[in-house]
Every structure is written in C-alpha cells, then in structure tokens.
Image (cartoon, rainbow, N blue to C red):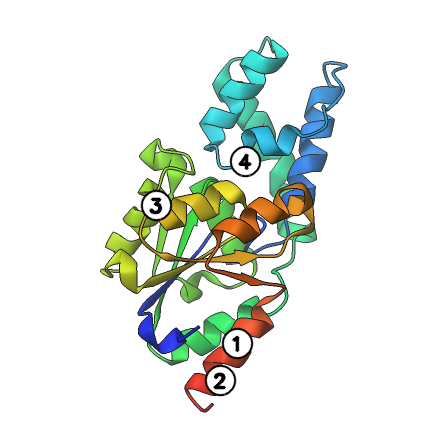
Amino acid sequence: MKIKTYRSFIFDFDGTLVDSMGLWNAIDHMYLGRYGIPCPEGLSNKISGKTFQETAQFFKDFFDLPDPIDTIMSDWHQMAYDLYMEDVPFKPGVPELIETLRSLGCSIAIATSNTRELTTAYLRRHRAEHWFDAMSFSGELQKGKPDPTVFLHAAKLVQTPPENCMGFEDTHEGIRGLIDAGMTAVAVEDEHQVSQRQKILNLADYYIDDYYQILEEVRYEYSL
C-alpha cells in the first residue's frame, strides 16, 4: 500500500469513521412513521452520498411530505443529536490509526455529507477535535457525492495535491468521488453496504475490514 507516499489522509464520517449508518436507517423509519409511511427497501441506496439538503428534498418529493425542507432537516437534526452523543462509536482502530498518523506528521481531514453541527458536536463529545486539521462539508459546497468537490476542497484545506492523498469511504458514491478527485480510494467495510459491496470492491483501490489493517501497514513501513 506504500503509506509513506501519502502526505494527507481524508476520511468520510458516517459509516467510515463512525458506526452510524444504523442510526440513520432508524431515523428514516421513525420519521416516515410519523406520516404512516413505511420505509421502502433500498432507501439508503437512493440517498447515499446526497447532501443533507438534497436528502431532505428527495424525501419531500418522493414521499410527498407537507413540511418545508428546513423543517425536515431540523427534525432530523433533533432526532439524531442525542443518539450521536450516546450511541455511536468510532469504528475499530480509528483512534489508534489517527493518533499514529498524526505522530508521523501527516495531515488528517474529514470530507462528509453530514452537517458541521452534528460532526463537530460528536468530535467535541469524544474529545477528538484535535485529530483533524480540516473538515469539508458537501452541504456547504452544495455538491453531494459522487461529485468530487468535497474531497478536493479537503485536499485544498490541508494544502496537499490530490494524488498525495489517501481517502477512506464506505459507499460506492464516496469511492467514485475519491477516484474522480484523483485520490487513492480505500473502501471501509460497513455492514449497511452489503448490497453494494461488489460494486465497491470493483471500484476501490483497496478494501479493508477494519483500520487495524492500515495501522499494521503504517507500523511496518515506519518500523514503529
């Protein structure tokens, strides 16, 4: 994998750094349940990679919801906040890998479709804000994945050419965005992406079951 050739490491948030995709599936069910609407199979694939606002617009149009977009997003944010603070862990190996990369002088960034408010609140809660040199939000850029803008913006913030960045994603849309950004794309195992796994395997440069695999490679290359 030649970790030494990369100066910066860019991570998606949900499903990649944190094990939160089950939470969002539960919120989809709860939210639609308010209107007596069953959550259709495959909904997560339809909204994967979309910005928060794009997802709200999709829900309003697809399910013919009466509430305005801002109200939908506000309701989701309120539903998600307490769950994020208490019930969402980092994925195995995340703290160890990031602390090791930081000790080696590497830059670390987040590139996410989640909101700045939820992402930063989670990092504060877990005392992990200092891990990241920059954060890029697709909603603020008005470009959802697989558009590469959110990744290119992250690379710009850490002042690293895309070809010197390694990116981590759990979705097919995210991997496509990394590839189109000119970065090395590492797919991270997530149980909620089972139906897309083969497509992800076919597209990604590397595939890992957990971050301990990368950590072992880092320790080997740097003789730690």
Q: Which residue is mark 3?
A: 180
- Sooner in the amino-acid sequence: mark 3 or mark 1: 3
The image quadrant that residue 140 belongs to is top left
SS label for mark 1: helix
Camera-side residue of 9 and 194: 194
Q: Which residue is mark 4?
A: 48
Query: Could you tell me the amino acid type at mark 2?
Result: Arg
Q: In x, y percent, where is residue 40?
A: 72, 23
Task: Name the residue rendered at 47%, 74% in the picture.
Answer: 99
Residue sitting nearer the eye, 46 or 21: 46
> Percent from the top left, x then y, of residue 47?
55, 30
Question: Which of the 4 quarters of the picture holds residue 125?
Answer: bottom right
Name the residue tied to disc 1.
215
* Earlier sequence position, callout 2 versus callout 3: 3
Q: Earlier in the sequence, mark 4 or mark 3?
A: 4
The answer to whether the residues at label 2 and label 3 have Cβ atoms under 8 Å apart is no
- At 50% from the left edge and 79% from the top edge, which residue is drawn? 217
Query: What kind of element bears circle 2?
Result: helix
In the rendered view, does 84 fall on the left or right side of 220?
A: right
Q: Are marks 4 and 2 in contact (CB under 8 Å)?
A: no
Mark 4: which secondary structure? Answer: loop
Q: Which callout, 4 or 2, points at the residue further toward the start of the chain?
A: 4
Pinpoint residue 171: horizontal percent, then vertical percent: 54, 45
Using a 10 Å C-alpha cutoff, classify the residue at mark 1 as few (fewer than 14 neighbours), some (14 to 19) or many (20 or more): some
Q: Between disc 4 and disc 1, whose residue precedes?
A: 4
Which residue is under mark 2?
A: 219
Q: CA distance from mark 2 to mark 3?
A: 29 Å
